[in-house]
Amino acid sequence: MITCVLHWLLLCSCYITPKLYLDLLQQYSTMLSNGKAELGGNRRRLLDGIAKLAETNTALDAMQTQLNGLQPLLLEKTASTSALYKQVGCCWPSTCICPPACVHGLMRDCLQACLWLCEQVCMR
């Protein structure tokens, strides 16, 4: 069928010799082995990624458990720090008028201004 189409388009005959047929088989074999190698590499990469995700999930679960275990300690430390602030008589950071972004140190000048204001208020 293909030879008829080529003959009609090119107005010449197309013959397949044993040499051309063997070359075709060799080329097909090469393309097949390259495709299998690429598919195997992609599969291995996907399996490695899945294993890494499972490992990360395990580590995340362990960290979440550890964080949940440290939650009461954090509440205790927060309470003791607030009590220490009250004992010292300092109002900062509980009455600081700066926005939370400033308190977390994202804007250094604002944080310095809050500390200066706290020193002025607490020193009175």
Image (spheres, rainbow, N blue to C red):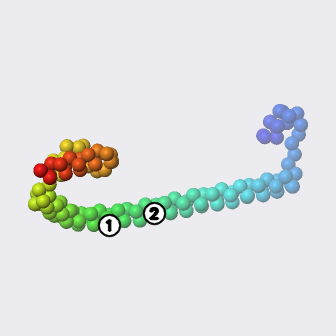
Determine which of the numbered discs, if any, sits on residue 23 in the image. Answer: none
Query: In the drawing, does residue 20 fall left or right of residue 93?
Result: right
The answer to which of 76 and 87 lies nearer the viewer is 87
Instruction: Give, as a three-letter code, the residue at label 1.
Output: Ala
Report the residue that reaches farthest toward the right.
12
Quadrant that contains the N terminus: top right
Name the image quarter holding residue 19. Answer: bottom right
Query: In the drawing, does residue 1 fall left or right of residue 114?
Result: right
How far apart in space, not on screen, are marks 1 and 2 (Cα)?
15 Å
Query: In the drawing, does residue 51 fall left or right of residue 42?
Result: left
Q: Residue at x 35, y 62 (%)?
A: 60
The answer to which of 40 and 45 lies nearer the viewer is 45
Expressed as whole percent of the image width and height from the top left, the position of residue 118 reads 19, 49
Name the image quarter holding residue 99. Answer: top left
Name the image quarter holding residue 10. Answer: top right
> How many marks are shown on the rendered structure?
2
Expressed as whole percent of the image width and height from the top left, the position of residue 4 reads 82, 37
Mark 1 or 2, nearer chain start: 2
The answer to which of 53 and 101 lies nearer the viewer is 101
84 relative to 13, above or below: below
> What kind of element bears circle 1?
helix
Determine which of the numbered discs, if any, sits on residue 62 in the image. Answer: 1
Q: Residues within 10 Å of mark 1 (few under 14, many from 20)?
A: few
Instruction: Give, as a three-letter code, the residue at label 2.
Output: Lys
Mark 2, residue position:
52
Q: Residue at x 55, y 62 (%)?
A: 44
